[in-house]
Image: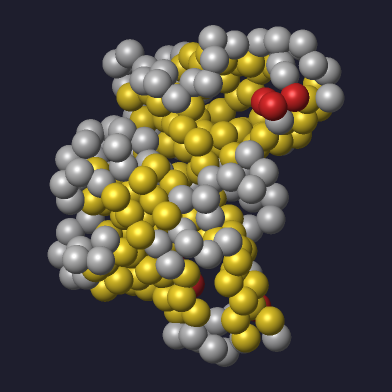
Amino acid sequence: AQSVAQPEDQVNVAEGNPLTVKCTYSVSGNPYLFWYVQYPNRGLQFLLKYITGDNLVKGSYGFEAEFNKSQTSFHLKKPSALVSDSALYFCAVRPFNSGNTPLVFGKGTRLSVIA
Amino acid sequence: GAGVSQSPSNKVTEKGKDVELRCDPISGHTALYWYRQSLGQGLEFLIYFQGNSAPDKSGLPSDRFSAERTGGSVSTLTIQRTQQEDSAVYLCASRAQGSYEQYFGPGTRLTVT
């Protein structure tokens, strides 16, 4: 069965500094990988995805993520954090060519960007 | 265009009562998913619908939970005889045929007292 681990419940970073939110996964075969962000009292917003191709994918709001097959990781990154990036971030996985199966989510990482 | 909408946004109910939560997916999206987000937890899959196929109910936590999708569009999640542990945010998502990402609604916050 597939699973996602987000080892940090909370990440604190100063505004302007680079940020990384970690994600590792376990899945049979090749994965589809996703990052979503949740602002207070809002639903989840799609940030970016890795399906195939370049290991570095770029998404919304200046975020990017790097797929590392050997380390089974898909860490989310941003070169310069903004206070407005403070939110709850979820990593999710679905097996390649698995049809319509639902996403499996990590427990989320709360990012706090301090001015 | 319009996103996924859910109603009500908040629902407070007494233990033992039944509740219905509604989801309007993005027009034309063939797949619809229900998830539950409990405090401090990730998202827990409940059920999904794809076109006219039989729904995948493998995530429903008990037989008190059921869902239907009428006309391939609107979906209703019903929880019978609610319990306090049912308190959570219930999120609906839809996905277009051939695409990979799911689009989420704002959720319904259910509180069982």
Q: Is residue A56 left or right of residue B33?
A: left
In the image, residue B6 above or below residue B103: above
In the image, residue B85 above or below residue A8: above
| Residue A100 x/y as whole percent | 29, 33
The residue lying at 49 percent from left, 55 percent from top is: A90
| Residue A70 x/y as whole percent | 19, 66
Where, quadrant-wise, is the C terminus of chain A in this rendering?
bottom right
Q: Nearer the viewer, residue A20 or A115?
A: A20
Q: Is residue B90 left or right of residue B30?
A: right
In this view of the protein, can residue A24 be seen by the observer? yes
Residue B47: quadrant of the picture? top left
| Residue A57 x/y as whole percent | 29, 69
The residue lying at 64 percent from left, 23 percent from top is: B21
Q: Nearer the viewer, residue B88 or B92?
A: B88
Is the image coloured rainbow, by chain, by secondary structure, or in one colour? Answer: secondary structure
The residue lying at 29 percent from left, 50 percent from top is: A26
Residue B19: quadrant of the picture? top right
- Count of marks, rendered view: 0
Q: Is residue B71 left or right of residue B38?
A: left
Where, quadrant-wise, is the N terminus of chain A in this rendering?
top left
In this view of the protein, can residue A84 be seen by the observer? no
In the image, residue A69 above or below residue B51: below
The residue lying at 58 percent from left, 45 percent from top is: B41
Residue B33: quadrant of the picture? top left
Q: Residue furthest bottom?
A: A16
Q: Nearer the viewer, residue A35 or A10?
A: A10
| Residue B4 x/y as whole percent | 53, 39
Q: Is residue B39 left or right of residue B99?
A: right
In the image, residue B38 above or below residue B51: below
